Amino acid sequence: MNETVIDELKKIVGEDRILTSKEDLLCYSFDGTPLRKFMPEVVVLPESADEISRVCKLAQKERFFIVPRGAGTSLSGGAVPSEGGLVLSMTKFNKIIEIDIENLTITVQAGVVTEEINKAVEKYGFFYPPDPASVKVSTIGGNVAENSGGLRGLKYGVTEDYVLGLEVVLPDGDIINTGVKTVKNVAGYNLNKLFIGSEGTIGIITEILLKLIPVPEYKKTFLVCFDDISNAASIVSKIISSRIVPATLEFLDNKTIRCVEEYTKIGLPINAGALLLIELDGNKEKVEKDTEKVIEICKKGKSISVDVARDEDEALKLTEARRSALSALARQKPTIILEDVTVPRNKLAEMVKEIDRISRKFNITIGTFGHIGDGNLHPTCLTDERDENELKRVEKAFSEIFEKAIALGGTISGEHGVEISKKKYLEKMIGSSGIKIMKKIKKVFDPNGILNPGKIF
Ligand SMILES: Cc1cc2nc3c(=O)[nH]c(=O)nc-3n(C[C@H](O)[C@H](O)[C@H](O)COP(=O)(O)OP(=O)(O)OC[C@H]3O[C@@H](n4cnc5c(N)ncnc54)[C@H](O)[C@@H]3O)c2cc1C
């Protein structure tokens, strides 16, 4: 990217919203994904859709790449500028535009930190359920681009279930709106769904219209411990098939429990083989009744202890401990590779056992946690990128893990996306015709390939 292009960019956003020094660029050369670092040539911090549109038009003329970036917490290399170019940081898009309680919606700019949405609406008695463990840092634009899940996915669904409309700048600079505040809208193709989970490759999301729902009246949070990891995993389908759908059903294996306890010191049972964090919410009477039923199911399923949180504070501590799982594991070794396989719930026990077998086969250390109620497991390898031999074994191990997930009728990613990390496994998942049609969709939006190159395919 030559000086003339940089000068043109300065004309669009002003000198103070362009970063070009090596020190600044370094901060945008990686995201939450290990082993992926590429320097961008310039970082631009736009403040309006119009500025982004002009940057896109310049990119078409000068043929440089644009990598949209929220908070950079992607765990699949999504925000890494894999081929240089311009990083478009969305952090200045941090405004809540409108809260409309009559229509149960909130309109936000794409760079708003996810947690801020709930802070803004809680006083009205409403909430926005999707809550990735990164909720305090990630942006809502990043959540939409990855179709993020979270701790409440089992009962409340994921990001896509709450997006009513988007304002998007297309790679050619056109600005479109994909939805309205109505509950129903079937005017033409569902462009909303196309942009959700599109991993920054077909448009830059600038504004998001989200659905809100009422805060449940009552909730109960408890921990159930098991000696054996597969007993914990097989409890999930027993709970949901008994017609109880917890808001949260999270899983930590022994390695993760130990690391989280060392980090948070909240008194987790470090000798348990596995634990489930369960939260039920809704009508008080029903929650109390369902809690009894779930505890009964767990006891029959060979649980060794149940601890019910005594108050909101204790419940919050348990949830925060679960949210810290990745950070807690990350303290153990220089390199942490977190994966994201998801299987049908009745196959969880088999998947968990297989992860254990594969880690022993390749002599690598894996801690597993995840949104087990969604069938979503995060086998997380603790390694060291300087050990090339071990890294090769890690790669083979994950390849076997993905193959097993596919064989069980699952997926290579439940929520973190394909981006760079999983692209070599995508064809196994969706077949060559699937890849062909996805590439055609990309071409329709971005024929010159300027947006987030090197991702997905
Ligand atoms: C500790 C930790 C816990 C996590 N827990 C979860 C979890 O529970 N569930 C889950 O699903 N994920 C989780 N993640 C992954 C990550 O937080 C999510 O993928 C999140 O949605 C990324 O948001 P971000 O703002 O950081 O996006 P970034 O990492 O900046 O970008 C991610 C992708 O979105 C694109 N993008 C960003 N903003 C826009 C935009 N405005 N328009 C178009 N494209 C855009 C980027 O180009 C990139 O492709 C976790 C990550 C960490 C580090």
Image (cartoon, helix red, strand yellow):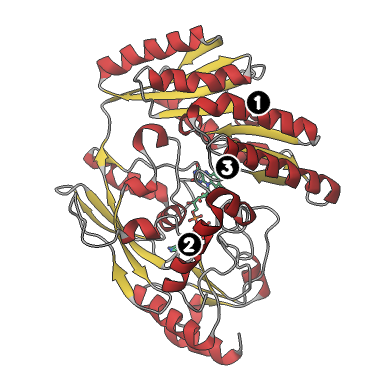
As helix, strand or loop, the secondary structure at mark 3 comes to: loop
Kind of residue at badge 1: Lys
Q: Give whichever of discs 2 and 3 has the lower sequence position.
A: 3
Callout 2 environment at 10 Å: few (<14), some (14 to 19), or many (20+)? few
As helix, strand or loop, the secondary structure at mark 1 comes to: helix
- The residue labelled by disc 2 is 438
Q: Establish if 436 lies above or below 118.
A: below
Kind of residue at badge 3: Asp
Q: Nearer the viewer, mark 1 or mark 3?
A: 1
Residue at position x 21%, y 56% from top?
186
Q: Marks 2 and 3, how far apart in space?
A: 21 Å
Residue at position x 24%, y 62% from top?
188
- The residue labelled by disc 3 is 340
As helix, strand or loop, the secondary structure at mark 2 comes to: helix
Q: Marks 1 and 3, how far apart in space?
A: 16 Å
Residue 267 visible here: no
Q: Give whichever of discs 1 and 3 has the lower sequence position.
A: 3
Q: Nearer the viewer, residue 80 or 8?
A: 80
Q: Give whichever of discs 1 and 2 has the lower sequence position.
A: 1
Identify the image quadrant of residue 168.
bottom left
In the picture, which quadrant includes the N terminus? bottom right
The spot of residue 304 in percent (x, y) is: 57, 9
Tell me if 104 is positioned left or right of 267 in this view.
left
Residue 253 visible here: yes
Q: Nearer the viewer, residue 410 or 317?
A: 410
Direction left: furthest residue: 102
- The residue labelled by disc 1 is 353
